[in-house]
Amino acid sequence: MWWALTTGVLAAGVLLVWVHAPLRANQMAIEELDGSWRTGLYLTLHSILFIPAELIVVATLWQMAKTGTLSRRVLVLALSAAIAFSVINLAWVMGAGWLMTAGVDGAWTQPRSSARNDFALYPTLLPWLPVGIPAVVVDVRRRLGLDRVREQRMAELRPMWESLTAVLPAYRLAELGPADGFPSEAEREHRMRIELEDTIYALSRNLPEGTAWPESAAGRAQLLREALHAWESGGRTAVSSAAGIETRPLWASSEADLDAVAREWETASARQQTSAGLTTASVRGL
């Protein structure tokens, strides 16, 4: 299949070069030809190649939205709308090309048509501005060392990640440092989330039959801690496929839910350490 797609794209590229060759010699735009078949064919080939690529992007975005937050879903909706306008514009460019070939005269078929350019610019590009500008600002802040949000998220995830992967080392790929092949914080955070998700799935499969994950982050953190202790002690219970337990908890794939559980995990650990310290102090006082 990939060979066929590659061959098709290369063939379309060669055909585009061949169709446009006479115009390059005369330094003309394809739209400036008067009633030539080259205009319709060139604009059709040039436009149609973008549509499959844009549809793949839309499919990828909607997969991301399934386990994302509300803000991510709104972002996916805005980008999908921009891509939809782009596909409509590409279809219109193809239609306008064949209208030029047929000799139809109008605002949409004029060479360098401002109406056609405006239709391509405003609906297609403007929805990307509220996405692109913040991304540029965040990247600049990160390069200047001013963006600590990702470091804070990793610091929240790390205690739970270290506890789970220490007991289930098979799910731990590396130490997640620059020397381990993960030079960027984004890559390290992504790898950490994958390993947390895998370990949670593994522990979930070995919970007792009939167990259900709580709705609250505190309850999930507590059940996860109990499952981890049971795994450490070797008291794991095989769960049949007919059991009512959710063997792949969706919350483990949600960044917001996973962050909330990690915070509760760290809070519970701090409480346990404080309680142990107070008990030790009381014993020493006696």
Image (cartoon, rainbow, N blue to C red):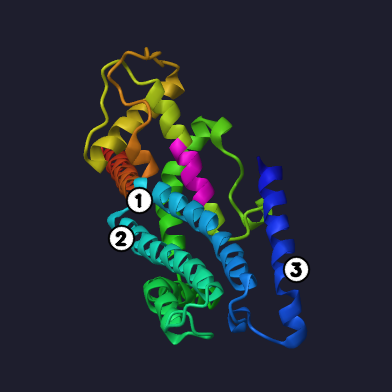
Q: In this view, does 188 lie to the left or right of 115?
A: right
C-alpha distance separating marks 2 and 3: 43 Å
What's under tag 3, amino acid-wise? Trp
The picture quadrant where one finds residue 187 is bottom right
Viewer-nearest of discs 1 and 3: 3
Which residue lies under the disc numbered 1?
68
The residue sitting at 29% across, 45% down in the picture is 264
Based on the picture, tell me whether residue 172 belongs to the magenta stretch.
no
Which residue lies under the disc numbered 3?
18
Nearer the observer, 120 or 102: 102
Vertical placement of 55 versus 212: above or below?
below
Quadrant into which the N terminus falls: top right
What's under tag 1, amino acid-wise? Gly
C-alpha distance separating marks 1 and 3: 46 Å
Majority secondary structure of magenta residues: helix
Q: What stretch is highlighted in magenta?
A: 189-197
What's under tag 2, amino acid-wise? Val
Nearer the observer, 200 or 2: 2
The residue sitting at 51% across, 30% down in the picture is 168
Vertical placement of 136 versus 178: above or below?
below
Query: Residue 228 placed where, x, y %?
Result: 40, 28
The residue sitting at 46% across, 50% down in the picture is 60
Nearer the observer, 124 or 43: 43
* Circle 1 Cα neighbour tier, 10 Å, few/some/many (<14 / 14–19 / ≥20): some
Q: In this view, does 203 lie to the left or right of 282?
A: right
